[in-house]
Amino acid sequence: MKKLLLIFSVIIFIMLTSFYNASAEESNISVAAEGAILMDANTGEILYSKNIDTQYAPASTTKLMTALLTLENCKLDDIITVGKNPPFAIGSSIGLIEGEVVTVKDVLYGLLLPSGNDCALALAEQISGSEENFVKMMNKRALELGCKNTNFVNSCGLYDKDHRTTPMDLALIMKELIKHSEFSTIALTPYYKMKATNKTTVERFLQGENALALKPNLDPKHRKYYYEGIEGGKTGYTVESFASYVASASRDGHRFIVVLLHDETNNRFFPDAVALLNYGFDNFNLTKLYSKGDFVTNYKTKALTIPLYAEDDFYYTENKNEALKPEFTLEDTSKQIISIKKGDYVSKGDLTLGTKTLGSLNLVSGNDYMKKTITLKSSDSFSHKIMTGLYIFVIIIISILILILILRFIIKIFKRKKKKVYYY
């Protein structure tokens, strides 16, 4: 009977483990791109991965970093006077003219909708003075975002053997970029009219390329690709790097980012992106485990007990089809606490789900605490001084008395010797 129970337990464990490790690959999702990722942007968890740390030529998805640096360093109404280089940019262009006065806003529309390489160069020179300096900024910012396998060579994505990034790194860049509401406003615009400038009397008609953002009534051709909750995206293509695509979508505050790189079919990235996003929304919830200020546990030693509270909200990606629940472990209970104020950091807790690490939660003190020490009040101190003085005085008196007794004894002996008579 015991053997049967043991075998049954092992079978259940294996089934649960296998179910827990289920991924998009096991959900009959197959993407054409060589590199792909589905990331939960709220928690950073990777829900689908395919060569996510392999370097590929990103083509115009490079412009996501150019857009990020622009939004971080410029205002939309800043004025750009186009230099001599942008009009000669190779590849896609909106036809910027040397000496043309335009706004950053207009150039961003030209960058993100028709993917103008001249717009990328104009923004690079506006921010850094030259594309060479701007590329340094791009690579520096990529490192700051945690991109470990990225090396940008230009601001637009023209093919270069050294111009490389990965699905993981592009997801991190998109995760930061989507925090800027201006990006979504621009990226979701299907058509934009750029007004005449000092160099042209003709309005420019700029059209978006992101099919997931084109509503059916605007573009019936792409009816099957429009995606509810889409926040923005960027396509890319060169002959050498093939097709690429990055997009972000959010529903009820739950955000997913999808990246597809090096798609040789050049036509699968829209439906593949939809399939991955559907997989995310259909199978996962964004679950709040702790709210800021929630009681979590007590910090206990032999000498004290301090209630610990969550410093911030903590979310995790919950698989709708699994029964596992997160476990909490207090990281450090050995430190000596002498004094602490309410709200001060005390320790942190590690949260796991099965064998998976969910992250850490900083914990703060729920009250003030000061280790008790023996101290003297001012009145006690005065009494202590009096007692000390009396003690010294008594010691001195006793010492004097002892000295007098010793002297008297010596004198007495001396007198006896003097009175003694000797006979011969």
Image (cartoon, rainbow, N blue to C red):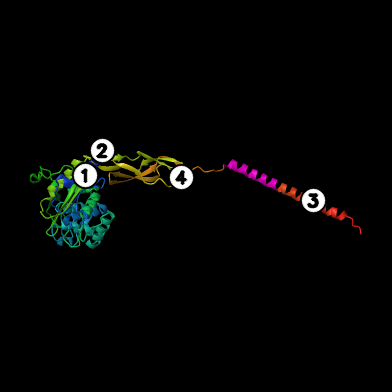
Residue 45: % across, % down: 25, 47
Q: Nearer the viewer, mark 1 or mark 4?
A: 1
Amino acid at circle 4 = Ser
Query: Could you say which is closer to the camera, residue 336 or residue 145?
Result: 336
How crowded is the residue under tag 4: few (<14 C-alpha within 10 Å), some, or many (20+)?
few
Quarter occupied by residue 83 = bottom left
Sequence-first disc among 2 and 4: 2
Q: Which residues are magenta?
A: 377-395
Amino acid at circle 1 = Ser
| Kind of element beneath mark 3 | helix
Query: Could you say which is closer to the camera, residue 159 or residue 388?
Result: 388
Instruction: Kindly report the secondary structure that dominates the magenta region of the rendered protein.
Output: helix
Sequence-first disc among 1 and 3: 1
Q: Which residue is mark 3?
A: 409
Sequence-first disc among 2 and 3: 2
State if disc 4 and disc 1 touch (CB < 8 Å): no
Residue 203: % across, % down: 12, 52
Q: Which mark is residue 339?
A: 4
State if disc 3 and disc 1 touch (CB < 8 Å): no
How crowded is the residue under tag 3: few (<14 C-alpha within 10 Å), some, or many (20+)?
few
Q: CA distance from mark 2 to mark 4?
A: 52 Å
Q: Is residue 167 visible?
A: yes
Q: Nearer the viewer, mark 2 or mark 4?
A: 2
Amino acid at circle 2 = Leu
Q: Which mark is residue 5?
A: 2
Amino acid at circle 3 = Phe
Locate residue 119 relative to residue 390 in the image: left or right.
Answer: left
How crowded is the residue under tag 1: few (<14 C-alpha within 10 Å), some, or many (20+)?
few
Sequence-first disc among 1 and 2: 2
